[in-house]
Amino acid sequence: MKGTNKQQSEAMSFTGKVVLVTGAAAGIGRATALAFGRAGACVVVADSSVDGGHATAAMIVEAGGKALYVNANVSRASEVDALVDKAVSRYGRIDCAVNNAAIEEEQAGMLDTDDAQYDRIMGVNVKGVWLCMKAELRQMMQQGGGTIVNMASVAGLVALPTRSLYTASKHAVVGLTKSAAVEYARAGIRVNSLCPGAVRTPMFARMLERDPQLEEKLKNTYPMGRLAEPAEVANAVMWLCSEQSSFVTGHQLAIDGGLTAL
């Protein structure tokens, strides 16, 4: 059964909690921010897309929640530090951080990629997660604990042919997650990653424009015969941030319709 907003709100409450979500202007990030807002959290919406970020924050507020939009490029240390400072200045702490911001890579063989593509993908997908975790961990150490969820991908668990740089970046996210989880476990900080398969997001829509047959190909590949919805990924994020997963850290949770079970 697909995840629903009702299931989210009934299952977990984050009343009084402060949640930071990067890449929250659209797709999985927006769905996650909205879910936390419905569950009672104060949500810090971070994204370099001003219009999209403001729109997500407005949706949370219009639904009766609390939200703050912060314009931030996660590949720049000064902007990440400012993001965390603004979150703490407004709400006093950061209980949960969801490092979701990422960019895609167009299909290309490894020999067809270049330095510029490498720097672009790694700058956001890896450096961005690393910078965010450093700033979040510093704050969580000061306040005595917290939870972090890094958005990896099935590409962090298996290979995606013709997307070598994206695959490498998501494997790196998994490695960063495991190392941080072990290093800060006794500080009361849990760090996990999510590894979604294909999700029906604006990023996926752009991929469909380049390859209109892609959706049917993927449906035939996934054992469940369909793509994931953003709300289903948001459900998993919320579980990893909740006390229901209190003994889970350093874990890579696949949300992939059975793909990696093949």
Image: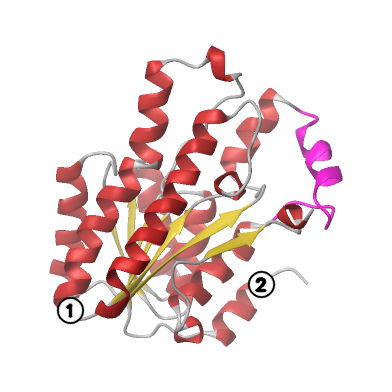
Mark 1 secondary-structure assignment: helix
Say which residue label 1 marks.
143
Inspect the image, locate mark 1, and give the three-letter code of the amino acid beneath it: Gln
Q: Which of marks 2 and 1 is in front?
A: 1
Distance (Cα) linking label 2 and label 1? 33 Å
Residue at image location 49% in from the left, 49% down from the top:
26
| Colour convention | secondary structure
Find disc 2 in the rendering and name its residue.
Answer: 4
Task: Let me know if residue 224 is in the magenta part.
Answer: yes
Callout 1: few (<14), some (14-19), or many (20+) C-alpha neighbours within 10 Å? some
Side of 181 relative to 153 (left or right):
left
The amino acid marked with disc number 2 is: Thr
**Few, some or many C-alpha atoms within 10 Å of disc 2 (few <14, some 14-19, many ≥20)?**
some
Task: Give me the residue at 36% from left, 67% from top.
Answer: 181
Q: In this view, does 42 lie to the left or right of 173?
A: left
Image x and y of residue 147, in percent = 36, 72
Residue 69 screen position, x and y as percent: 29, 56
Rendered location of residue 47, percent (x, y) = 34, 47
Task: Give percent across and percent down for residue 44.
Answer: 31, 63
Q: Give the range drawn in magenta.
A: 212-228
Residue 115: say if magenta: no
Q: Can residue 213 be seen in this view?
A: yes
Q: Residue at x 50, y 30 (%)?
A: 165
Residue 47, visible in the rendered structure: no
Q: What element carries label 2?
A: loop
Residue 250, relative to residue 161: is it above or below? below
Q: Are marks 2 and 1 in contact (CB under 8 Å)?
A: no
Give the position of the N terminus as an image quadrant: bottom right
